[in-house]
Image: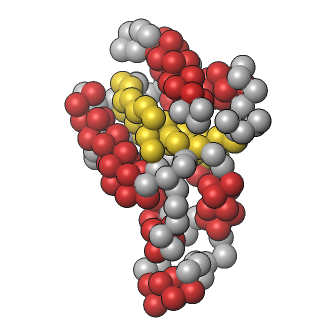
Amino acid sequence: MKNKLKILSICGSPRQGNSETILNYLKQCLKDYNIDNEIVLLRKLNINQCHGCVEYCNHKHNCCQKDDAIKLLKKMEKADGYIFISPNYFKMPTGLFKTFIDRTSIFFTNQADLSKKRALVFAVGADKISEINKCLKNMVDNFCKTLGIRVVASKSYHSNSELKGNLNDIFINSSNKNIKDELQAMAKELINSFK
């Protein structure tokens, strides 16, 4: 294993809430192992929708747009692994996260080798877990696996949609009794996957 792993956490929530709270907790878990972890909040970036200009990207092997997605894709190339999280919207990740996914298509076009990358993937939402799991499956199968990213662990969590100012709700509501232990275990699993 390299001396210092770099993990990039990418949050698809349009607001501060459950997703960001989970990422902040995981950041602390990784810090305990001396792992660098940068949290990227997609809502704070200027990422345009994919223009579908395949005549450009298929031949030039890069994107013609000059927005924050370009910097984010470079960070993804440099990172050893990822943590992806999104709220469940209609059994899919949010529009923010989907736009991000679309812009990673340049990796697919370039046949980039992401097979050494590892990821944890999470979905949160107020629906039944069976519904949130459909969002999670989309993120794991249709995104990570398509790009060749190895998913070490994935999990859906039930959350309240109305937080009423309590950003710690995901940890104290009765739906997720073992969430902190599970997150710690998954952080350790991510680290061990590089050995």
Q: Which x, y percent locates residue 97?
A: 47, 53
Q: Is residue 35 left or right of residue 168?
A: right
Residue shown at 77%/36% (left/top)?
3
The number of callouts visible is: 0
Q: Is residue 155 left or right of residue 180?
A: left
Q: Quadrant of residue 146?
A: bottom left
State whether residue 14 appears in this view. Answer: no
Q: In which quarter of the image is residue 152?
A: top left
Position above or below: 56 against 1: below
Position above or below: 172 against 7: above
Q: Which x, y percent locates residue 148?
A: 43, 55
For the N terminus, the image quarter is top right
Residue shown at 66%/49% (left/top)?
79
Q: Which x, y percent locates residue 169?
A: 50, 18
Q: In which quarter of the image is residue 28?
A: top right
Q: Is residue 2 left or right of residue 53?
A: right
Position above or below: 67 against 163: below
Residue shown at 43%/80% (left/top)?
52
